[in-house]
Image (cartoon, grey):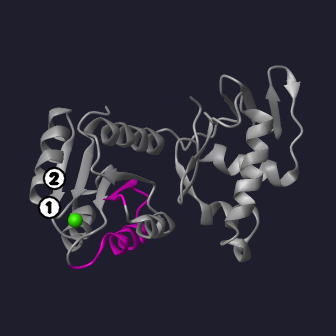
């Protein structure tokens, strides 16, 4: 049974907290409310939510510290909610272990879609299917093969590793730092120009319209996201 999934809402602004509560309850979620980071950590430990919606700007301990506290013991999906102009903060949140983010002011539909996607990823077995197909290309993670139609596409080892990390995290935002560390190594975490070059190569080889990528998407200033459709 997937009904009554439990959402922990961490938000210090009363009206936003209430709006989230009303919308989530109306869609059959069980909602836990925390106005501070301290409350969030206490409630999470006591009630084991299925997903956490976390405002980053909180009084007392801030959102990034809450992520650190949660990641000490749980892999619960964490979706960060933060202001549009707070990019460094969002990057810190992703690096601390957040799974995704939504920008304030958010549309309720977008937020609910992100929530469903996060819950789906945590309940399906982290997508260990070996073959992932989009409308235009197919990736076989076991055989390390990429095909467009029936044509095998040659990728360099670096292009393959980059694609592999994105596909294994499909649907999920992967931060620039995480990609650089996983593909090039820990010393390369600031070399974001590498990402632009290699993602550009992958798009030219795989995307039907490389200048308007459908599957290998850029989240400006943040990272990249592979989406099947
Ligand atoms: Ca706030």
Could you tell me which quadrant the C terminus lies in?
A: top right
Dot 1 corresponds to which residue? 13
Give percent across and percent down for residue 167: 65, 43
- 79 vs 138, left or right, is left
Q: Does the stretch in magenta take in 63?
A: yes
Picture coordinates of residue 215, whole percent (x, y): 62, 36
Q: Nearer the viewer, residue 112 or 143?
A: 112
Could you tell me which residue is drawn at 45 percent across and 45 percent down? 122
Residue at the location (27% across, 78% down)?
A: 61
Q: Residues within 10 Å of mark 1 (few under 14, many from 20)?
A: few
User: Total of numbered circles in the picture?
Assistant: 2
User: Which span of residues is magenta-colored?
Assistant: 60-84
Residue 206, above or below 121: above
Q: How crowded is mark 2: few (under 14 residues within 10 Å), some or many (20 or more)?
A: few
Query: What is the distance, in whole Å, between disc 2 and disc 1 at their CAs?
Result: 6 Å
Image quadrant containing the N terminus: top left
The answer to whether the beta carbon of the residue marked 1 is less than 8 Å from any atom of ligand 1 is yes
Element carrying mark 2? helix
Q: Which of 127 and 212 is in front in this view?
A: 212
Ligand 1 within 8 Å, label 2 CB:
yes
Q: Quadrant of ligand 1?
A: bottom left
Mark 2 touches mark 1? (CB < 8 Å): yes
Residue pointed to by mark 2: 16
Q: Residue 28: x, y in percent?
A: 20, 34
């Amino acid at each position: 049974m997937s009904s009554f999934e439990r959402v922990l809402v961490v938000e210090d602004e009363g009206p936003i907290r209430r709006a989230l509560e009303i919308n989530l309850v109306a869609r059959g979620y069980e909602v836990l409310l925390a106005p501070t980071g301290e409350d969030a950590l206490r409630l999470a430990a006591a009630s084991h939510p299925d997903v956490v919606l976390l405002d980053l700007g909180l009084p007392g301990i801030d959102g990034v510290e809450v992520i650190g506290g949660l990641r000490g013991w749980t892999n619960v999906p964490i979706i960060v909610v933060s202001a549009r102009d707070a990019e460094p903060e969002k990057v810190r949140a992703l690096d601390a272990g957040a799974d995704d983010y939504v920008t304030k002011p958010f549309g309720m539909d977008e937020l609910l879609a992100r929530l469903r996607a996060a819950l789906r990823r945590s309940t399906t077995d982290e997508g260990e299917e070996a073959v992932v197909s989009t409308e235009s290309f197919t990736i076989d993670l076991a055989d390390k093969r990429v095909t467009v139609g029936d044509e095998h596409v040659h990728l360099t080892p670096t292009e393959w590793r980059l694609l592999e990390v994105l596909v294994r995290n499909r649907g999920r935002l992967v931060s620039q730092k995480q990609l650089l560390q996983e593909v090039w190594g820990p010393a390369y975490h600031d070399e974001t120009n590498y990402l632009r070059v290699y993602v550009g190569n992958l798009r030219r080889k795989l995307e039907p319209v490389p200048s308007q990528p459908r599957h290998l998407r850029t989240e400006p200033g943040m990272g990249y996201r592979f989406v099947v459709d």
